[in-house]
């Protein structure tokens, strides 16, 4: 049947029409958890920073050189601690991204509980899902060092890795990325065009403080990506360049 931009967007619109409530809830859960985690981090660090500031002020009021050095060292340690915790929180949100993509992929075939968004937080999948997204971002960053264009091209080569990981949580990070590269041969332009077609919607969403995004644009966008993934995967299977068995969760690579 082949890849069809029109069919993908038409299917995504129909999906949203038939799953409006859960589609909106999925976005609210994703962005609510993400925003909540980051705000909680800032609140905790603000409290620690306040405590540290008061302590440093008291130490500095003594006027001794050792107190000043201790305050400076404490400031450096606090900054490093904040950075470490911030990175840890971001890494901890990676499985949520994969879970959201997995929910949309499954939902285009059947009714799926919204709890599926948290599926990658299971003990056996947590570190592997973080590793997949982290490795993908490291690769994109390294390619971007050559110039912006190679980084963009590679980001499209790896674009299906998270969907692959969501479909088969047992697959290794490197294999998910490798399969994505194989699947995206000849389709990077197709996916770029799909993303480009949403720019107008994203701009409209931004001027409504993302209210339009939550109630329509983002669910529509994620559904379109899920349908695109399925069509690209089906095309790769039809061409014989990938083995469908690798997408079966019970198979580990």
Image (cartoon, rainbow, N blue to C red):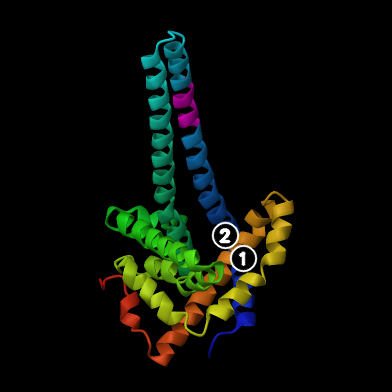
Q: What kind of element bears circle 1?
A: helix
The residue closer to the viewer here, 144 or 228, is 144
Answer with the quarter of the image where residue 149 lies: bottom right
Q: Residue at x 44, y 56 (%)?
A: 117
Image coordinates of residue 14 in percent, x first then y, are 62, 72
Quickly name the residue at label 1.
220
Q: Residue at x 59, y 78 (%)?
A: 8
Quickly name the residue at label 2.
23
On the rendered structure, is 4 left or right of 92? right
Image coordinates of residue 154 in percent, x first then y, are 48, 72
Instruction: Decide: is 83 above or below 24.
Output: above
Segment colored magenta: 43-50
The residue closer to the viewer here, 133 or 31, is 133
Q: Is residue 16 visible?
A: yes
Q: Is residue 45 located in the magenta-colored stretch of the structure? A: yes
The residue closer to the viewer here, 92 or 28, is 92
């Amino acid at each position: 049947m082949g890849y069809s931009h029109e069919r993908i967007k038409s299917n995504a619109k129909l999906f949203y029409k038939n799953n409006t409530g859960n589609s909106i809830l999925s976005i609210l859960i994703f962005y609510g958890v993400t925003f909540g985690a980051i705000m909680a981090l800032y609140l905790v660090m603000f409290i620690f920073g306040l405590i540290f500031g008061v302590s440093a002020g008291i130490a500095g009021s003594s006027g001794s050189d050792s107190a000043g050095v201790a305050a400076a060292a404490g400031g450096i340690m606090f900054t490093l601690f904040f950075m470490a915790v911030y990175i840890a929180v971001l890494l901890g949100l990676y499985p949520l991204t994969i879970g959201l993509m997995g929910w949309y992929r499954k939902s285009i075939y059947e009714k799926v509980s919204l709890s599926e968004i948290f599926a990658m937080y299971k003990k056996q999948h947590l570190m592997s899902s973080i590793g997949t997204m982290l490795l993908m971002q490291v690769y994109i960053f390294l390619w971007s060092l050559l110039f912006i264009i190679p980084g963009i091209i590679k980001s499209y080569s790896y674009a299906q890795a998270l969907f692959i990981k969501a479909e088969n949580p047992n697959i290794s990070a490197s294999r998910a990325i490798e399969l994505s590269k194989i699947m995206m041969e000849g389709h990077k332009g197709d996916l770029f065009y799909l993303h480009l077609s949403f720019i107008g919607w994203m701009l409209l969403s931004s001027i409504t403080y993302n209210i339009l995004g939550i109630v329509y644009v983002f669910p529509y966008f994620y559904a379109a990506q899920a349908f695109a993934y399925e069509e690209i995967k089906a095309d790769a299977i039809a061409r014989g360049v990938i083995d469908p068995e690798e997408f079966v969760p019970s198979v580990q690579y």
